[in-house]
Amino acid sequence: MGDYDEDTAFLGQTGPYFWAKFFFLNTVFVSTGFNGLYMVFIGAAPKHHCLIPDVNLTEEWRNAIIPVTLVNGEEVQSQCSRYRLDVVGNLSAEGYVPGRDVNLTSLQQEGCLNGWNYSKEIYQSNIVTEWDLVCDNQWKVPFASSTLFVGYLFGSLISGQLSDRFGRKKVIFISIAAQCVSVLLQSFSQSWRTFCIMFLFVGASQISLYISAFVLGTEVLSKTMRVIFTSLGAFLFYCIGYMTLPWIAYGIREWRTLLAVLSMTAVVYIPLWWFIPESPRWLITQGRVEEAEAIVREAARKNKVEAPAVIFKESETTPLLRTYTMLDILKSKNIRCITLMCLILWMAINIGYFGLSLNTSNLSGNPFMNCFLSATTEVPAYVVSTWLLRKCPRRALLSSFLFIGGGVLLLIQFIPDTLQHVALALEMTGKFGFTMAFSIVYIYTAEIYPTVLRNVGMGMCSSAARIGSITAPYVIYLGTYNKILPYLLMGSLTIASSVVNFFLPETFNRDLPETVEQMQECQGLCNGPKKKKYVENGVSGNPSTQLETKSNLQALTP
């Protein structure tokens, strides 16, 4: 068939039809915002100490049976041990007074054999309090978080194939239904293992929903609306969901009820089935031209323009092009080098982004407000990054924000405990830097790879991103040993990646490379000093054109 954008140019670039589809498709991303990070609340560990059974102890011994330990220079009650109950019982019965008659440090200690007593100041219940995921079982919390991101990995691998075979619209609504059912079943989990298994399905359905809706938007909307949709719309509506989550969690402090309520929000998307069309581009590839024309004619009617008698004209058959695979990336030393640096970038950015997102419950202050602030910092980051991408070189821009994000994380260790608000401000600044880098790296990577390798290269980088997000919960888990360790690791890794980024080729104001040879001629550490202007099908390489390449390439995870 002929060029779709050329055949449908009569529709115009804006109009009621495009704005309506823009809004309906973006509302889908709201659910990915609050369904992706509820683990921040249901996996948070409240204050706890060993449960003391109802035995005959004096008030003095009941208060003294929990040892006092020094944590970050502050004396706190031990969370994982107590003095031996039988020994304390005998001393209490004989009338000894702790601290006066008995040196407590000489007493033997034991684990929390009778379970734990949890504070209900913030959470009435969550998976930590329900299944005692503390002390020796504390590792199960980051493991559960990682299962969500493993689901992202599987979902991103299969969603494209499913939407290519069955259509974008069907996969979107099947994914919404699957996400709803998965979260609902997760709320009925009777064990930690069942919870983790359901989290896999939550992750797979969520990323499948995001990718399918993103692709449908790029295929249905006009060129102008497509740029807004891919660079701002999807991200901002994701942020709306992310900012809504802490207020829902604030009102519902019981984890099973919270998940049930979040799952039921999918009901509001049912009417969208009658307002969101199938992709005309996909229908044409399936030979269903009449259905595609019907959708375009409906768009013309709502935009109040007249459609031609024949919309899609037959054209000469396009010759089959060679299919490129991952092996083609491995064959060339230059492309291998560039790809390795891109993989490092994507992993580092995802570790930092998701690490800081999951760490909000560990910050001082109100965890609900901290999560809201973390989400709010993303809004200006996406707006500013979209503007800067049209004005600034990619390499310097990305390295600058990586350096800012990593640098402030390294500074946190020098902030005294009495200035927690300063540490919180630095962490939010780091989140702003990572969000900026997160937005920039998509288009930068897409501009580096040539047309024939772009999908393969972006796919490899997306897989590296999933590995980074799977790793992020364990980076935060290091904070149980020393609260500075996560910041040191994320900050150092980010600073290192900002240096690596300087050795990638610059793509600003350069036409997109189409062939492998053109990519190899681009200046960079792996490619040598040669510079050459590329022309792709006669299209000028201005920033707006480059920004639009993001439309079919982005595959986030929210």
Image: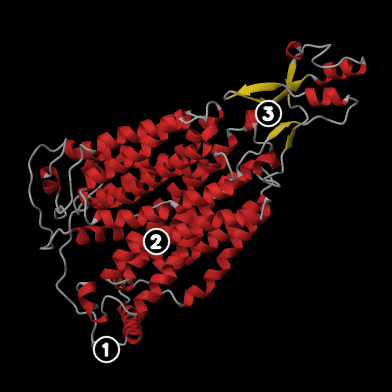
Question: Could you tell me how far apart the alpha carbons at marks 1 and 2 are, in whole angstroms?
Answer: 30 Å
* Disc 3 target residue: 79
199 with respect to 556 (left or right): right
Quadrant in which residue 72 is drawn:
top right
Quick check: 348 above or below 12?
A: above
Q: CA distance from mark 3 to mark 1?
A: 72 Å
Density class for disc 1 (Cα within 10 Å; few <14, some 14-19, many ≥20) is: few
Asked if labels 1 and 3 touch by Cβ distance under 8 angstroms, the answer is: no
- Residues marked 1 and 2 touching at CB (< 8 Å): no
Residue at x 69% of width, y 36% of height: 132
- How packed is label 2: few (under 14 Cα within 10 Å), some, or many (20 or more)? many
Residue topped by disc 1: 306
- Tell me which label, 3 or 2, sits earlier in the chain: 3
Name the residue tied to disc 2: 234
Tell me if residue 551 can be seen.
Answer: yes
- Residue 410 lies, in percent from the top left, at 40, 31
**SS of the residue at dot 1?**
loop
Q: Quadrant of the N terminus?
A: bottom left
Camera-side mark, 1 or 2: 2
Q: Is residue 198 above or below residue 546?
A: above
Which is nearer the N-term, disc 3 or disc 1? 3
The foreground one among 520 and 83 is: 83
Q: Residue at x 47, y 65 (%)?
A: 28
Of the two numbered discs 3 and 1 in the rendering, the one whose residue sits closer to the viewer:
3
- Reply above or below: 379 against 340: below
